[in-house]
Image (spheres, helix red, strand yellow):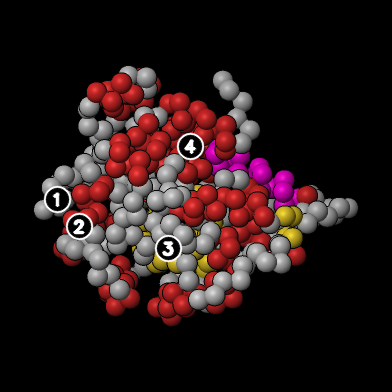
Amino acid sequence: MPVITNIEDLKRIYQRRVPRMFYDYAESGSWTEQTFRDNCSDFDLIRLRQRVAVDMSGRSTASQMIGQDVAMPVALAPVGLTGMQHADGEIKAAKAAEAFGVPFTLSTMSINSIEDVAEATSKPFWFQLYTMKDEDYVSRLIQRAKDAKCSALVITLDLQILGQRHKDLKNGLSAPPKLTPRTIANLATKWRWGIGMLGAKRRHFGNIVGHVKGVSDTSQLNAWTTEQFDPTLDWGKIEKLMDQWGGKVIFKGIMDAEDAKMAAKLGADAIVVSNHGGRQLDGALSTIRMLPAIMDAVGGQTEVFLDSGIRSGQDVLKALALGAQGTMIGRAFVYGLGAQGQQGVSTALEVIQKELDTTMALCGERKVTALGRHNLLVPEDFGGRWQD
Ligand code: GLV
């Protein structure tokens, strides 16, 4: 068994085990991938303030996200096609999250359905919603999430149209993969993945296939988003969705102070400062750079979470110290899942928690909830001098 000491170790195994098409899907940003890269490298610009001679006993990473107790403020983000990274991927990731004590978010574009995950878990999970032109379908989807007792609706606001990721087009990304000479040659080297998939509960988009009409190819994310996603989504429609849902709501994809204020005004329980992992607007700022302005705009009025670029507990700590109440990880758990299934997701969470705990201690803090700006050394020009 390889010794896993960080998320990068999981990524190396993940890359070997998962078909190229799905590795590329996870590991891409849109167009030039500038934002995708900045999301990670901007975390490195912030340094930590080391403190000594502080009693480090009795430490805790426990906190709350939207009023729910969490073992650490790190939720699993919604990731499309998770069940193609590993057989029954959403079920496995949800079980690992439940055992660890952090929220799991099921994507609309998942392979396992809402019902599959509800059946396999015992605590409520969060459901991420994409809004479609077919309002009837959206209403049924919301009702299905209610029936499954999901404890929050995560409405993604930054994907009315899909940002272009070159590799997905070149690879002909689909679920399940279409068998071409190229995919067959690659799949032949991924026997472990293939054996798992033969026994998988599903190999299609579980929330979609059998539930929608009018899509030319339900196996293709591209066809589905182009033909079905609602380009007219606006704040008025969002309010209607909130009414339909009637429970806790998290708005994901906020990258602007004005949008954050609007979200808070509508009564969002939380917003996620997110640029979709650099997969949508290439050229947007990294989320960690954007966070301080958003905290200034809405801190205290709604909870603020951050995703995009988190690969370590140090990254989590930096986001929390800049004011976020919570964070979300996408790729960091997908690497674990593709590498080692449910155990790999647990390992990813353990790695991040250990890093968070040790970093917190060496910064002189015992509780994750006490972290603040005083723990950081932030370059003077970190916010950047941008003219709009
Ligand atoms: C969809 O959620 C994607 O980023 O591919």
Quarter of the image for the N terminus: give it: top right
The amino acid beneath tag 2 is Gln
Residue to which mark 4 is pinned: 335
Report how far apart the C-alphas of labels 3 and 4 lie in the structure.
22 Å
Percent position (x, y) of residue 153? 36, 62
**Tags 3 and 4 in contact by the CB under 8 Å rule?**
no
Dot placed on the residue nearer the N-terminal end, 1 or 2: 1
Residue topped by disc 3: 253
Residue at image x 37%, y 31%? 20
Q: Residue at x 22, y 55 (%)?
A: 226
Q: Amino acid at mark 3?
A: Gly
Judge the density around disc 1: few (<14), some (14-19), many (≥20) Cα neighbours within 10 Å: some
For numbered disc 3, what is the local secondary structure?
strand
Per the image, is 352 magenta?
Answer: yes
- Write down the residue under mark 2: 228
Q: CA distance from mark 2 to mark 4?
A: 29 Å
